[in-house]
């Protein structure tokens, strides 16, 4: 079923009562409001590499880009849509994300093939810019770091994009400073014991599980591609 992102094909000015950031299939769109139902993860980054800020689908690229923690309104509102001096600027964050996530010259090679399956990108800078990004790219060379859906194992997450989980890269991801680059970790970053780590506890989890927290394990032998938990979303190394 083809999914469609809220507002992708309608005008913001007409349907201003919709809550942006949800992705749904075409049959789930409300026939009157043209809005997606407010269920599932808002600002989902499913199928996105949050280091490069590139995704394997347009809908989830826009959804991820709309997250205020990833795209600052004040930094893009005056940005020109194109290089010419006469080009206009983006009217709002949605227009920026909807435009930025479309294919561009940086996503293709030889003018007729994509450089990667992750060719929907919303980054405002080059993927290789910045000392921190360079260091992380070196440690995760050739790896697509993907945030999975709730309850998915990394084996399942990687298989869904036609790749396989790389077990020895879980150790690289299993630390707070790296997890915080890919996940919100709004409930802190805590040591845990599950085979589903590194992971983030979903917002609707029971309170005793620390909703919103990122989890890592101090027991390296527990790191596993097939681990999963019904209340977490895994951070997965795919290749």
Image (spheres, rainbow, N blue to C red):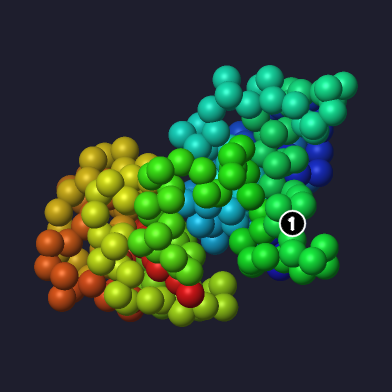
* Nearer to the camera, 208 or 223: 223
Horizontal arrangement in the rendering, residue 153 relative to residue 124 (left or right): left
The crowding category of the residue bearing disc 1, from other C-alpha atoms within 10 Å (few below 14, some 14 to 19, many at least 20), is some
Q: Position of residue 95 (x, y in %)?
A: 73, 33
Instruction: Find residue 173 and report its image quarter.
Output: bottom left
Q: Position of residue 121 (x, y in %)?
A: 63, 50
Q: Which residue is mark 1?
A: 26
Residue at 54% x, 28% y: name it: 72
* Nearer to the camera, 141 or 238: 141
Q: Position of residue 206 (x, y in %)?
A: 25, 49
Residue at 48% x, 65% y: name it: 144
* Image quadrant in which the N terminus is located: bottom right
Note whether 180 is above or below 154 in the view shown: above
Whether residue 206 is visible to the viewer of this picture, yes or no, is: no
Note whether 3 is above or below 9 in the view shown: below
Note whether 146 is above or below 11 in the view shown: below
Horizontal arrangement in the rendering, residue 223 relative to residue 105 (left or right): left
Whether residue 128 is visible to the viewer of this picture, yes or no, is: yes
Residue at 43% x, 57% y: name it: 137
The outermost residue toward the right is: 86
SS under mark 1: helix
Tag count: 1
Horizontal arrangement in the rendering, residue 14 relative to residue 200 (left or right): right
Q: Position of residue 58 (x, y in %)?
A: 69, 54
* Nearer to the camera, 216 or 31: 216
Residue at 17% x, 61% y: name it: 217
């Amino acid at each position: 079923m083809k999914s469609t992102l809220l507002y992708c094909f309608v005008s913001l000015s007409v349907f201003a009562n919709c809550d942006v950031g949800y992705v749904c299939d075409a049959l789930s769109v409300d026939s009157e409001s043209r809005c997606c139902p407010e269920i599932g993860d808002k600002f989902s980054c499913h199928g996105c590499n949050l280091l490069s800020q590139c995704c394997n689908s347009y809908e989830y690229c826009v959804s991820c880009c709309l997250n205020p923690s990833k795209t600052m309104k004040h930094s893009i509102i005056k940005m020109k849509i194109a290089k010419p001096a006469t080009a206009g600027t983006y009217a709002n964050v949605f227009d920026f994300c909807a435009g930025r996530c479309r294919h561009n010259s940086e996503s293709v090679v030889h003018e007729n093939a994509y450089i990667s399956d992750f060719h929907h990108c919303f980054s405002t800078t080059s993927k290789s810019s910045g000392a921190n990004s360079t260091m992380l790219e070196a440690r995760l060379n050739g790896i697509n770091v993907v945030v999975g859906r709730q309850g998915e194992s990394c084996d399942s997450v990687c298989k869904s994009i036609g790749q396989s989980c790389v077990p020895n890269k879980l150790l690289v991801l299993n630390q707070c400073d790296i997890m915080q680059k890919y996940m919100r970790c709004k409930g802190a970053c805590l040591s845990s014991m599950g085979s589903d780590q590194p992971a983030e506890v979903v917002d609707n989890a029971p309170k005793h599980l620390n909703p919103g927290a990122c989890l890592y394990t101090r027991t390296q032998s527990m790191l596993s591609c097939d681990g999963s938990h019904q209340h977490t979303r895994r951070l997965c190394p795919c290749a």
